[in-house]
Amino acid sequence: LTCTNPSKASDPILSYPYYDTDGSGLALSSPLATKLVFKDYLPEGYDGWTGDVGLVAMLLLNEIARCDINSNKHTGINLPKRKDSIQTLMTAWISSLPSFDEMKDIHPLLWDEDDQEVMQSSSTKKIYRLLDDIEDDASWLTEKLWSNDRTTFPESVTIMAGGIEEIRPCYSQDGFRYAVALVRSRSYFVDGALRLLPYLDYANHDDFDTVEITGGGVGGGGLVWESAKGAILKSGKSLEVGEEVKISYGPKGPADYLLDHGFVPEMCQSTSNTGGAITAELTFE
C-alpha cells in the first residue's frame, strides 16, 4: 500500500466498511458464511475443526468460483449481492492473489513434506495438527456438500490472472488448504470477528513505527459508504506521498508468525538487549 497524501503519525489513512448485514462490500467474515452465503448449505451450528478460518476460507473459495471464465454454467453461490463496480474490484483482487504454486514457496501449509517435518519437530506450533484439521474438514465438506453439486462447488476453476488464463484449485482438499493458507496469512481479527479485507491485506508488516488494524465507526460521523462499522488503517509514523504504508501483524512469537504468515520478522529473530520477542506456551492435557 502506498500513501497518496501526506499524513502524520496516528492519522487515519484508510477507512474500510464491513457491510456485515448483507456483505455487499468487499469484506469477508465468518458470520457472513453461516448467516448468508452458506446458510442453506451448512447444517445449523456447523463447527469445523478449522473454526472461523475455515469459514472465511470457504467464502474465499466461493469468490474464486465466481471468477471462473470457462464454465458454461454459473459456478459458486451468487452471494453476497454486490454492485457491478464492487464485484469488479473483488474479481481483480482474486486475480492478484498468489497462485497455488506460488504459495508452495511462501506458506508452510503448502510446503513439501520434508520441510513440514522439520517445522513439526522444531516448533511448539504443530503444523501436522493443523494439516489434519484441514484434511478432516475438507473430507467432510466434500462428502456432505461439495461432491453433491460440482456446478456450484467446482474442484477447480480457470481465472484470468495478469492477462493469462490460470487454473486454480477450488472446492477440493488442495483448494481448501490453499484457501486456509491465504486466510491465515492475510486476515485480521477485528471488531469481534475474523475478517479478510481485500486490498487492505496488501499492507506489509514492519516491527517498528507501525500499529495494528483497529475497528469501530469509520468515516465522517461514523459512516463510510453507508456502513457504520469498519476497519481503520493508521500509520505509526509520518508519511510522505509515495511512501509505503506498513502495519503491525500483532504481538506473536516466531512460530506463530511462521505458521500464519510464512516468515519470521526481525524482532522475533533478535535475542539482543536492544529488542526481541520471547514467548512461552503452557499446554494442559
Image (cartoon, rainbow, N blue to C red):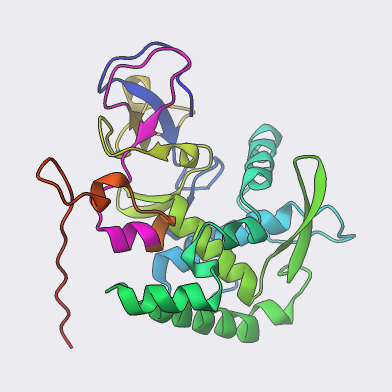
Dominant secondary structure (helix, strand or loop) of the stretch shown in magenta: loop
Residue displayed at 53% across by 37% down: 199
Residue displayed at 56% across by 85% down: 140
Residue 166 included in the magenta stretch of the image: no
| Quadrant of res 88 | top right
Residue placed furthest toward the front: 272
Residue 48, can we see it? no
Residue 27 appears at what percent x and percent y?
A: 50, 45
Image position of 124 with respect to 8: above or below = below
**Would residue 283 be found to the left or right of residue 223 on screen?**
left
The front one of 8 and 215 is 8
Residue 39 appears at what percent x and percent y?
A: 54, 67
Residue 251 included in the magenta stretch of the image: yes
Q: How many marks?
A: 0
| Quadrant of res 154 | bottom right
**Would residue 106 be found to the left or right of residue 216 on screen?**
right
Residue placed furthest toward the left: 273
Residue placed furthest toward the right: 72
Question: Magenta part of the protein: which range?
Answer: 235-258
Residue displayed at 54% across by 40% down: 25
Residue displayed at 53% across by 81% down: 135
| Quadrant of res 63 | bottom right
Residue 231 appears at what percent x and percent y?
A: 37, 37
Residue 112 appears at what percent x and percent y?
A: 56, 73
Image position of 9 with respect to 119: above or below = above
The front one of 244 and 136 is 244
**Would residue 124 be found to the left or right of residue 99 on screen?**
left
The front one of 129 and 220 is 129
Image position of 95 with respect to 63: above or below = above
